Image (cartoon, rainbow, N blue to C red):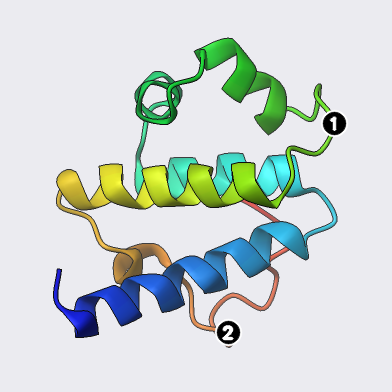
Amino acid sequence: MSSIETKTAGDELTWIAGSVVLNDNPPQQLKYWRKKFGIKQADLARKMDITPSVLSDYEKGRRPSPGVNFIKRYLVALYELAKANGHSGKEVAPTPIADAHINQPQ
């Protein structure tokens, strides 16, 4: 990855991480982004080296907040899987104007 691609990926991940952390319901927001990138829960869990049930518990809020390190690992793995599948963050990351209702996942 070139330095420009790295900076762009970092910017996109930072924006998405902010949308998760600042959301009223972070677990729901994690699931929203996973679905937005078109990644299966089992594939993401495998990439993160955790069980799908642990991932499901975090996405459903059945476990306490996973913390910043987990969210970072989650988003980096999600981004890497999406990129491997031919998607980019640019395709799914909304602009601030286009997604004024970030607290309302689809």
Q: Is residue 88 above or below residue 35?
A: below
Q: Is residue 92 above or below residue 15?
A: above
Judging by the rendered image, the residue that carries numbered circle 1 is 64
Task: Identify the residue at horizontal 21%, vertical 82% (top origin).
Answer: 3
The amino acid type, in three-letter code, at marker 2 is: Pro
Q: Quadrant of residue 7?
A: bottom left
Task: Identify the residue at horizontal 32%, vertical 79% (top origin).
Answer: 8
Question: Which of 105 and 79 lies nearest the eye of the viewer?
Answer: 79
Task: Identify the residue at horizontal 80%, vertical 24% (top origin).
Answer: 63
Mark 2 burial class by Cα count in 10 Å: few <14, some 14-19, many 20+: few
Task: Identify the residue at horizontal 44%, vertical 78% (top origin).
Answer: 11
Q: Is residue 91 above or below residue 75?
A: below
Judging by the rendered image, the residue that carries numbered circle 2 is 96
User: Which structural element holds mark 1?
Assistant: loop
Q: Is residue 70 above or below residue 72?
A: above
The amino acid type, in three-letter code, at marker 1 is: Pro
Residue 92 image point, x, y percent: 38, 63
The answer to whether 10 appears left or right of 64 in the picture is left
Q: Quadrant of residue 12?
A: bottom left
Q: Quadrant of residue 103?
A: bottom right
Residue 53 image point, x, y percent: 59, 11
User: Which structural element holds mark 2?
Assistant: loop
On residue 29, the disc is none
Residue 33 image point, x, y percent: 51, 49
Q: CA distance from mark 2 to mark 1?
A: 29 Å
Disc 2 to disc 1: CB gap under 8 Å = no
